[in-house]
Image: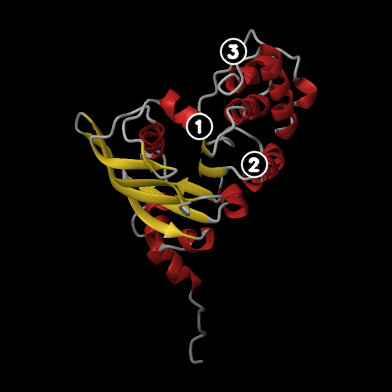
């Protein structure tokens, strides 16, 4: 069995004159929790769409669990064990939390009662056990984020792509969600997450890839990438890294 769960080789995607993803190659180790970070408009969600089969790449290759899945439809990828969440959460508002999660469970379980039972077990894993019979429309933003996670998790994925699962949450809700995501990874599901909340990246990720203007500009541990001058420039603007280095130098008193 390969140590690599997912690999992208020289992926590119353009929309008209916009080069959203340019020659991106990355790997995700089996059993790891990996982060993909970058400023707004960097191409992160487009890259997820290429990896999951929503978009067909202009060039390049995607391999999942040792197989070439380039251009394979999202439903086929889900059956193979590749699931994803979406940044904009859209539950079936008129259905209950249990019924929403059961939609994901039906990928593996055709029987209704069994799918509902599986939904309950998943709800407990993500902290929605007390809200199983609540209409999805009545959930808070944090609750909807957990529901989106639960629906993907109910498909029994080998690899879970999380697209800003913490976006829109307050600091307390973020602190409560971090152990949920960590628990999923510890259960054996490989996780690749897009995230802007650096607190979560620092706490969760073993390896980080950094995308800016459609191109990978850095990779490494969270500590390594957050101190990388190229990453600082991408997030904070040209010249920032040099300014920060200058500010961090110890000053000496005149005549010393």
Task: Give the secondary structure at mark 3.
Answer: loop
Observer-nearest of 161 and 120: 120
Q: Which residue is mark 3?
A: 92
Observer-nearest of 236 and 160: 160
> Does 118 appear above or below 39?
above
Task: Give the secondary structure at mark 2.
Answer: helix
Image x and y of residue 247, in percent: 47, 69
Image x and y of residue 109, in percent: 61, 20
Residue positioned most to the bottom: 256
Q: Which residue is mark 2?
A: 184
Residue positioned most to the front: 1
Quadrant of the rendered image containing residue 110: top right
Disc 2 to disc 1, C-alpha distance: 13 Å
Residue positioned most to the left: 17
Mark toward the start of the polypeptide (2 vs 1): 1
Task: Say left or right for 233 vs 248.
Answer: left
Residue density around tag 3, few if under 14, some if 14–19, many if 20 or more, within 10 Å? some
Mark toward the start of the polypeptide (2 vs 3): 3
Task: Give the secondary structure at mark 1.
Answer: strand
Mark toward the start of the polypeptide (3 vs 1): 1
3 and 1 marks in contact (CB < 8 Å): no
Q: Which residue is mark 1?
A: 84
Tag count: 3
> Does 1 appear above or below 45?
below
What residue sits 54% from the left and 43% below the top? 191
Residue density around tag 1, few if under 14, some if 14–19, many if 20 or more, within 10 Å? many
What residue sits 34% from the left and 51% below the top? 216
For discs 2 and 3, the disc positioned in front in the rendered view? 2
Image x and y of residue 222, in percent: 52, 58
Task: Say left or right for 152 vs 39.
Answer: right
> Does 214 appear above or below 156?
below
């Amino acid at each position: 069995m390969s140590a690599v769960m997912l690999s992208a080789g020289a992926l590119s995607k353009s929309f008209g004159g916009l080069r959203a993803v340019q020659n991106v190659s990355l790997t995700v180790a089996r059993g790891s929790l990996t982060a993909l970070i970058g400023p707004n408009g960097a191409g992160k969600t487009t890259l997820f769409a290429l990896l999951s089969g929503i978009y067909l790449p202009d060039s390049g290759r995607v391999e999942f669990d040792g197989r070439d899945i380039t251009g394979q439809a999202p439903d086929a990828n889900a059956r193979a064990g590749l699931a994803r969440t979406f940044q904009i959460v859209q539950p079936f508002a008129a259905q209950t939390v249990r019924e929403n999660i059961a939609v994901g469970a039906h990928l593996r379980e055709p029987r209704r009662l069994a799918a509902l039972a599986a939904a309950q077990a998943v709800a407990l894993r993500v902290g929605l056990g007390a809200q199983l019979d609540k209409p999805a429309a009545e959930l808070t933003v944090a609750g909807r984020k957990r529901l989106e996670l639960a629906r993907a998790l109910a498909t029994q994925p080998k690899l879970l792509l999380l697209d800003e699962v913490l976006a829109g949450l307050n600091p307390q809700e973020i602190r409560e969600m971090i152990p949920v995501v960590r628990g999923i990874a510890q259960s054996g599901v490989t996780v690749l997450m897009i995230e802007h909340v650096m607190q979560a990246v620092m706490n969760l990720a073993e390896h980080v890839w950094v995308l800016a203007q459609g191109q990978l500009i850095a990779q490494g541990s969270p500590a390594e990438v957050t101190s990388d001058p190229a990453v600082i420039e991408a997030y904070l603007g040209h010249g920032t890294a040099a300014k920060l280095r200058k500010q961090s130098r110890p000053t000496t008193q005149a005549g010393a």
